[in-house]
């Protein structure tokens, strides 16, 4: 956490600098770089806060295997619902290789719920250029919570839903760090 804070402080210092600094808010050339850096630092900070599981580890091999099957079923059911959803469908159907993507997502949840090491990605960076708005996060969390409650054992469903809720907050804070002229979260500062 300390490294993230010091990096964040350095970004703020450069962003708020005066006198023609290329990282100043008045220089639009560097706006996307600043937003990306700001979002990544915030998401990294959130990731540090949320990576430790709150449930006791499952040591029994058969129980772990059962949970792996449930995680895969949860991801598949969630994406089936998402593809059909009027708000999320256009984003979900645009995924290049949905089958491969679902495997990555299942690995993410396996790491989160079982502590496996199969997922080593950066979920925030993968979502930064998607055409998503705050309302997508609300719907995503609704569908995910519904699906996790249907498919996963209760302790793991509760853990997954809590992690998903935390991630939606972190992603939104990273993607929409400003308040627009309309008073809503925005990717860019109000003009």
Image (spheres, helix red, strand yellow):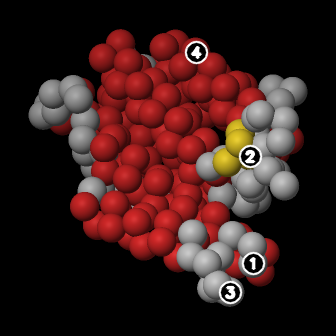
Q: Earlier in the sequence, mark 4 or mark 1?
A: 1
For the residues carrying marks 4 and 3, which lies nearer the camera in this image?
A: 3
Quarter that holds the N terminus: bottom left
Q: Dot 4 corresponds to which residue?
A: 146
Disc 4 crowd, CA 10 A, few/some/many (<14, 14-19, 20+): some
Residue 129: image location, x then y, percent: 72, 60
Element type where label 3 sits in the image: loop
Neighbours of disc 3 within 10 Å: few (<14), some (14-19), many (20+)? few
From the image, tell me which residue sits under label 3.
Answer: 20
The disc, 4 or 3, on the residue closer to the chain's N-terminal end is 3
Give the quarter of the image for residue 65: top left
Inter-mark Cα distance, 4 to 3: 51 Å
Tell us which disc is closer to us: 2 or 1: 1
Q: Are marks 4 and 1 in contact (CB under 8 Å)?
A: no
The CA distance from mark 2 to mark 4 is: 28 Å
Q: Are marks 2 and 1 in contact (CB under 8 Å)?
A: no
Which residue position holds label 1?
Answer: 27
Q: How many marks?
A: 4
Query: Nearer the viewer's eye, disc 2 or disc 4?
Result: 2
Q: Secondary structure at mark 1?
A: loop
Question: Is 87 situated above or below 150?
Answer: below
């Amino acid at each position: 956490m300390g490294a993230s804070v010091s990096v964040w402080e350095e970004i703020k210092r450069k962003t708020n600098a005066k006198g023609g600094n290329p990282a100043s808010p008045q220089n639009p050339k560097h706006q996307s770089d600043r937003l990306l850096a700001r979002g990544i630092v915030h998401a990294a900070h959130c990731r540090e806060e949320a990576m430790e599981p709150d449930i006791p580890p499952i040591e029994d091999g058969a129980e772990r295997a059962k949970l792996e099957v449930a995680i895969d079923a949860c991801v598949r059911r969630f994406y089936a619902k998402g593809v059909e959803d009027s708000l999320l469908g256009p984003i979900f159907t645009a995924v290049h290789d949905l089958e491969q993507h679902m495997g990555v997502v299942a690995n993410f949840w396996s790491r989160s719920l079982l502590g496996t090491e199969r997922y080593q990605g950066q979920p925030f960076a993968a979502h930064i250029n998607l055409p998503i708005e705050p309302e997508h996060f609300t719907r995503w969390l609704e569908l995910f919570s519904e699906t996790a409650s249907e498919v996963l054992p209760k302790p793991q469903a509760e853990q997954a839903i809590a992690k998903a809720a935390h991630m939606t907050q972190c992603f939104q804070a990273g993607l929409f760090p400003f308040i627009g002229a309309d008073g809503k979260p925005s990717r860019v500062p109000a003009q």
